[in-house]
C-alpha cells in the first residue's frame, strides 16, 4: 500500500474506532491516477456487514454536481445551451412569469423555484409526473437571476424534466450512458439505485442528525425548501421502513448512490480538463464556462454567502477554500470535488450523518490527503 493510502487508512480506522463514523469510504485521484481508495467500518448494523470498496452510499446533494455535469455534456453536444429557456422545451414551466428562466439560472440556483410542494408524503413522491407538474405550476419566489437560493429538492426535478423534454431520455439514463458508462463506473454510480443492488447499500444512521435537526427553529426558508420531508422519509434503505411502500428503485430525481471511488473518478475527469484515461467527457471550453464562478452573494435559503459556478459550489472547506476547486457536498457530510490546478479529485462517503451543528470529517480527511500528496490548501 502506498504511504499516502496507508496514512489515510489509519485515519479512517481511528474515526470509526472513536465512534465519529460508522462506515466510511475515501478515494482520491492525483494527476490521473487513483492514489487513495480506502474504507473502514460497518455498512449495515443489522447484518454486521462490513464496508468494502463496492459498498453503495446515499450521498444526497453530492448528486447536484453529478447532475450538473450531465447537463454540461448535453451543452457540449449542442442538445442544450446555457441560454436555453426551460419553457422552450417545457412550455408548462413558463407559467406565472417563469418563462425567462434559463438553464444557466437553474444551474446557479437563481431560477426562483427553491420551494418544494408542501404536504406530500414519501409515497406521493413516487408520482414523479404529479410532483413535476406541481413544481412547474409554482409561482417564483423571485425573478430569474435576481437572487440565488439553494434549490434543495426542486433542482433534481427541474433538471430531470428539462433533460427529458430535450432528449427523450431520463436523467438516470443520461447519467448512466453519458457519464458513468464511459468512465467505467456504471455499477458504482446511480441516481436511482436498482433493486438488484440492495445488498450493497449502506444503511444510514441519521439518529443524531435528526435529533439535532428537530431542536433547530422550524419555519425557516430551508424547511420550506424541503417541503417538511425528513431524512428518513427519502433515503434509500435495504429494508422498507414502516409507513413507506418502497426502499430503492424509486423514481426520485434527487440524491445519488455511489462509491467514493466512483465520485473521485468522475471528478478526476473534470480535474484533468474534461478527460481521463482517454475518455473525454467535456471540451476544455465548456468545462471552463461551467466552472467559472457566477455568484458571490447571499443565499436566500441557506442564509449565508456562497460561491457558485454553473452547478457546482466553489471554495468549500473540503477543498481548503480554493476558489478554483469545485464540487458539491451532501446532507450529513458526503463530499466530492475537483481541484484542476493540482489535477486532484476527492470523494468521501459515509453512513453516520453528521448533525448540522457538528463539524464534518471530510475537510479533515481531504486536508490529510493534500498533505500526503504535497498539495497546498490555500487558494
Image (cartoon, rainbow, N blue to C red):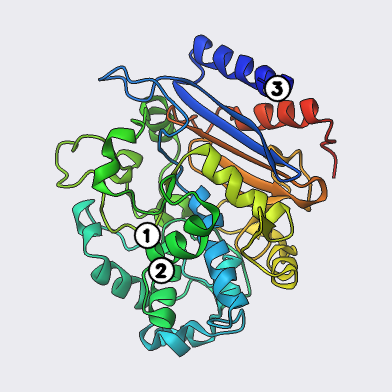
Q: Position of residue 164 (x, y in %)?
A: 38, 76
As helix, strand or loop, the secondary structure at mark 3 comes to loop
Residue 140 visible in the displayed image: yes
Front position in the image: 209 or 139: 209
Q: Is residue 301 above or below residue 352?
A: below
Question: Percent from the top left, x then y, of residue 369?
Answer: 72, 29
Q: Are marks 1 and 3 in contact (CB under 8 Å)?
A: no
* Residue receiving disc 2: 160
Q: Nearer the viewer, residue 93 or 1?
A: 1
Q: Residues within 10 Å of mark 1 (few under 14, many from 20)?
A: many
Residue with the mark numbered 3: 2
Q: CA distance from mark 1 to mark 2?
A: 7 Å
CB atoms at circles 1 and 2 under 8 Å apart?
Answer: yes
Residue in front for this viewpoint, 104 or 229:
104
Quadrant location of residue 284? bottom right
Q: Which mark is residue 253?
A: 1
Residue drawn at (31%, 17%), measured in percent from left and top?
Answer: 48
Query: In this rendering, would 322 be left or right of 62?
Result: right
Amino acid at each position: 500500500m502506498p504511504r499516502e493510502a496507508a496514512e489515510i487508512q489509519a485515519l479512517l480506522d481511528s474515526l470509526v474506532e472513536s465512534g465519529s463514523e460508522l462506515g466510511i469510504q475515501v478515494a482520491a485521484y492525483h494527476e490521473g491516477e487513483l492514489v487513495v481508495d480506502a474504507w473502514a467500518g460497518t455498512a449495515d448494523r443489522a447484518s454486521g456487514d462490513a464496508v468494502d470498496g463496492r459498498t453503495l452510499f446515499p450521498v444526497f446533494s453530492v448528486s447536484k454536481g453529478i447532475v450538473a455535469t450531465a447537463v454540461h455534456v448535453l451543452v457540449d453536444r449542442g442538445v442544450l445551451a446555457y441560454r436555453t429557456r426551460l419553457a422552450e422545451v417545457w412550455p408548462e414551466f413558463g407559467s406565472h412569469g417563469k418563462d425567462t428562466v434559463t438553464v444557466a439560472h437553474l444551474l446557479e440556483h437563481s431560477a426562483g423555484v427553491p420551494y418544494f410542494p408542501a404536504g406530500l408524503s414519501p409515497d406521493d413522491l413516487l408520482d414523479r409526473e404529479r410532483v413535476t407538474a406541481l413544481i412547474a405550476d409554482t409561482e417564483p419566489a423571485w425573478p430569474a437571476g435576481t437572487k440565488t437560493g439553494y434549490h434543495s429538492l426542486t433542482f433534481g426535478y427541474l433538471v430531470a424534466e428539462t433533460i427529458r423534454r430535450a432528449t427523450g431520455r431520463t436523467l438516470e439514463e443520461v447519467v448512466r450512458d453519458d457519464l458513468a458508462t464511459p468512465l467505467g463506473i456504471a455499477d458504482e454510480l446511480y441516481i436511482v439505485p436498482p433493486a438488484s443492488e440492495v445488498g450493497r447499500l449502506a444503511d444510514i444512521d441519521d439518529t443524531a442528525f435528526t435529533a439535532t435537526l428537530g431542536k433547530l427553529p422550524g419555519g425557516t426558508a430551508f424547511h420550506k425548501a424541503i417541503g417538511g420531508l425528513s431524512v428518513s422519509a427519502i433515503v434509500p434503505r435495504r429494508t422498507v421502513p414502516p409507513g413507506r411502500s418502497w426502499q430503492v428503485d424509486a423514481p426520485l430525481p434527487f440524491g445519488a448512490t455511489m462509491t467514493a471511488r466512483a465520485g473521485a473518478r468522475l471528478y478526476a475527469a473534470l480535474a484533468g480538463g474534461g478527460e481521463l484515461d482517454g475518455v473525454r467527457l467535456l471540451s476544455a471550453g465548456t468545462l471552463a464556462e461551467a466552472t467559472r464562478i457566477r455568484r458571490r452573494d447571499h443565499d436566500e435559503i441557506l442564509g449565508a454567502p456562497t460561491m457558485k459556478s454553473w452547478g457546482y459550489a466553489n471554495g468549500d472547506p473540503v477543498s481548503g477554500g480554493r476558489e478554483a476547486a469545485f464540487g458539491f457536498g451532501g446532507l450529513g457530510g458526503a463530499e466530492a470535488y475537483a481541484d484542476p490546478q493540482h489535477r486532484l479529485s476527492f470523494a468521501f462517503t459515509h453512513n453516520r450523518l453528521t448533525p448540522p451543528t457538528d463539524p464534518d470529517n471530510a475537510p479533515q480527511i481531504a486536508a490529510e490527503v493534500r498533505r500526503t500528496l504535497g498539495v497546498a490548501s490555500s487558494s
